[in-house]
């Protein structure tokens, strides 16, 4: 299992490129993402403009590369919020007394009654659209699903013989949680986070596409989508290419999560 | 209502008696969750900054007189104490009155009823299409189709990683811009339904197909298939009579999840293809901060979602007799 499969090599290479684009965008696209060239507007993809230009003649390739950092940050933050909240609920339910487990589980059930993006939309109605609210909204909307998985993981690990042994050996409750329970839950948590980043990027970009997230003229993938929305049928490259990068990041995150899951299961 | 109907019938067999408490418990759970959803939304909406009376009269910034504001507050009951407003709201909810939309100045129930049909048609056709594609892929790959297996796993990645809007754009580009086969926006009639349905069904079929495949492979390796083979049934008899049924169990279990993705997907798909429906109304209500309409749609979806999950549990017990034996 030490050797990398081609899919994993592909995922790692793409992730490396995305990280380079996020940290030093100038290395991959030396141009200015905000430079306006009114005479060059709506150019289709060509050698001069790999992915074409937008309504103000800005180069879409340059904007995509420079938007990588912000776009990935939104996905990561939303996942962190979702998994963080889920960890609190999952641990409370899995480790707490019965009444706490009952209460938390009922609360999660109520949240589950808002399927998909509904919880996010409700949150946006209350706090208004924007990057910050849509990121928190995505985190909030994904939390119940993670919490349920974490709770069931904790319940499985809690009954494991090694925890019983630690109890018999007289380890304190905190020591048992920190040294035995968390390390054994963390593996699946890591997989969950990797798979979650893909989902968060997709959901956050959907909200941006609907005009509820990041706003133009920021060079952020979701904002670019939102700007290109009015031109879908005439100037398709304005939404197609930013969307392609969202799909690409989500695909590699999902691939990586899956292969981590397989390795974890087989080891 | 269903509980009352079943309650009237005298329990004849022992099996019957076990159904009743199960169903009552489930329906009690549904009522509890609905109450909680209604309460959470009611108090969450109070967190919105700004005066709701102003929102009704055309949003902040509009020139409104104090007299007009007072009139609106009285008309919508906004001048009463919060707790009383909450009780009134619950009371109206019980009789199915969801209030009036701020932006459309029409009853929320009316707006929902007007738009429900389009979304329901889209969702049901998509669900059927997705199940058929998934079943075909699962059956084909279980019986040794390697191409079907890779199409299946490709669709699964699509399901997990491709946003609906991007799939929709790509389908529009392929089928209407380049090939010119289908209209880019949703025209009335079956032709306009093709692209929206494909957008919703393809990702769904990826997940469904993968799950069905695993369950069918498990079934093909199980003792009852061995005994069927020993009885001399042909390979296709074994497959169609025994393994196929097992594809249904996990698919039914995913129905609640599928409902969620269809609703989220409908918001995007109806917007892109300019189809009238609940999803598009929800989006414009969110954009205009039309609070009663958002609450109405949210509560309606929550109710539908819980009915779907209860029905799927019921269907599970019918399809899979093992679940009935160890009922609480």
Image: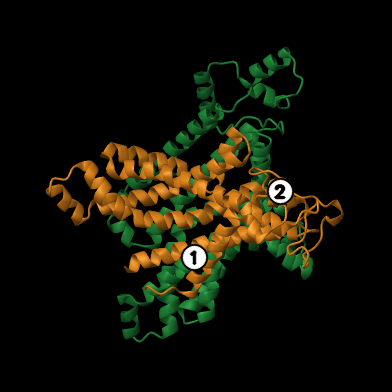
Image quarter for residue A245? bottom right
Q: Is residue A252 visible?
A: yes
Q: Is residue B240 above or below residue A215?
A: below
Image quarter for residue B214? bottom left
Q: Is residue B248 visible?
A: no
Determine the colour of chain A.
orange
- The chain holding disc 1 is A
| Residue name at image x 25 percent, y 51 percent | A180
Task: Residue B281 in the image: state x and y as whole percent.
Answer: 67, 42
Q: Which mark is residue B50?
A: none
**Mark 2 and mark 1: Cα distance apart in space:** 36 Å
Chain in green (letter): B
Q: Secondary structure at mark 1?
A: helix
Task: Residue B319 in the image: state x and y as whole percent.
Answer: 40, 62
| Residue name at image x 71 percent, y 45 percent | A216
Q: Quadrant of the C terminus of chain A?
A: bottom left
Viewer-side residue, A218 vs A233: A218
Q: Which residue is mark 1?
A: A255
Task: Residue A124 in the image: state x and y as whole percent.
Answer: 59, 38
Q: Secondary structure at mark 2?
A: loop
- The chain holding disc 2 is B
- CB of mark 2 within 8 Å of CB of mark 1? no
Q: Is residue A149 above or below residue A5?
A: above
Q: Is residue A218 above or below residue B186?
A: above
Q: Which residue is mark 2?
A: B276
Task: Residue A166 in the image: state x and y as whole percent.
Answer: 17, 50
């Amino acid at each position: 299992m030490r050797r990398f499969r081609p899919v994993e090599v592909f995922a790692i290479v793409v992730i490396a490129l995305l990280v380079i684009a996020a940290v030093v965008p100038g290395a991959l696209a030396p141009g200015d993402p905000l430079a306006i060239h009114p005479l060059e507007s709506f150019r289709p993809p060509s050698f001069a403009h790999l992915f074409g230009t937008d309504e103000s003649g800005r180069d879409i390739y340059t904007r995509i590369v420079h938007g990588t950092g912000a776009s990935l940050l939104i996905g990561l933050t939303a996942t962190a919020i979702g998994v963080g909240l889920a960890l609190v609920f999952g641990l409370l339910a899995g480790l707490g007394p019965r009444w706490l487990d009952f209460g938390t589980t009922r609360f999660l059930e109520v949240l589950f009654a808002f399927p998909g993006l509904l919880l996010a939309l409700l949150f946006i109605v209350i706090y208004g659209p924007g990057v910050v609210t849509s990121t928190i909204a995505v985190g909030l909307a994904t939390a119940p699903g993670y919490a349920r998985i974490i709770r069931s993981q904790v319940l499985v690990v809690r009954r494991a013989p090694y925890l019983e042994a630690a109890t018999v050996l007289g380890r304190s409750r905190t020591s048992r949680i920190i040294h035995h329970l968390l390390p054994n839950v963390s593996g699946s948590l890591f997989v969950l986070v990797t798979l979650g980043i893909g989902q968060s990027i997709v959901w956050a970009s959907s909200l941006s596409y609907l005009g509820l997230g990041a706003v133009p003229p920021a060079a952020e993938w979701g904002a670019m989508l939102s700007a290109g929305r009015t031109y879908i049928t005439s100037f398709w490259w304005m939404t197609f290419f930013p969307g392609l990068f969202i799909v690409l990041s989500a695909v590699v995150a999902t691939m990586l999560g899956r292969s981590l899951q397989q390795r974890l299961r087989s080891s | 209502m269903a509980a009352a109907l079943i309650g009237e019938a005298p329990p004849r067999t022992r099996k019957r008696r076990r159904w009743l408490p199960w169903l009552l418990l489930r329906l009690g759970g549904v009522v509890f969750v609905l109450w909680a959803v209604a309460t959470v939304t009611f108090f969450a909406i109070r967190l919105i900054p700004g005066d709701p009376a102003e929102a009704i009269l055309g949003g902040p910034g509009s020139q409104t007189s104090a007299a007009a504001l007072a009139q609106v507050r009285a008309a919508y009951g906004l001048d009463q104490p919060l707790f009383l407003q909450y009780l009134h709201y619950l009371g109206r909810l019980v009789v199915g009155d969801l209030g009036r939309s701020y932006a459309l100045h029409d009853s929320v129930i009316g707006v929902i009823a007007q738009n429900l049909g389009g979304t329901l048609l889209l969702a049901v056709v998509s669900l059927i299409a997705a199940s058929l594609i998934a079943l075909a892929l699962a059956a084909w790959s279980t019986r040794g189709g390697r191409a079907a297996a890779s199409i299946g796993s490709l669709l699964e990645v699509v399901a997990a990683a491709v946003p609906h809007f991007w799939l929709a754009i790509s389908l529009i580009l392929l089928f209407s811009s380049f090939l010119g086969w289908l209209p880019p926006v949703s025209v009335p009639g079956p032709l306009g339904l093709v692209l929206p349905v494909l957008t919703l069904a393809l990702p769904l079929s990826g997940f469904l197909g993968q799950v069905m495949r695993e369950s069918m492979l498990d079934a093909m390796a199980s003792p009852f298939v061995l005994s069927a083979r020993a009885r001399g049934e042909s390979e296709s008899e074994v497959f169609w009579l025994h393994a196929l049924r097992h594809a249904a169990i996990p698919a039914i279990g995913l129905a609640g999840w599928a409902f969620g993705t269809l609703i989220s997907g409908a918001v995007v798909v109806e917007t892109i293809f300019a189809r009238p429906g609940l999803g598009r109304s929800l989006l414009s209500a969110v954009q205009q901060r039309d609070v009663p309409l958002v609450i109405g749609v949210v509560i309606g979806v929550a109710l539908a979602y819980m009915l779907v999950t209860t029905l799927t549990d019921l269907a599970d017990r019918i399809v899979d007799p093992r679940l009935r034996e160890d009922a609480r």
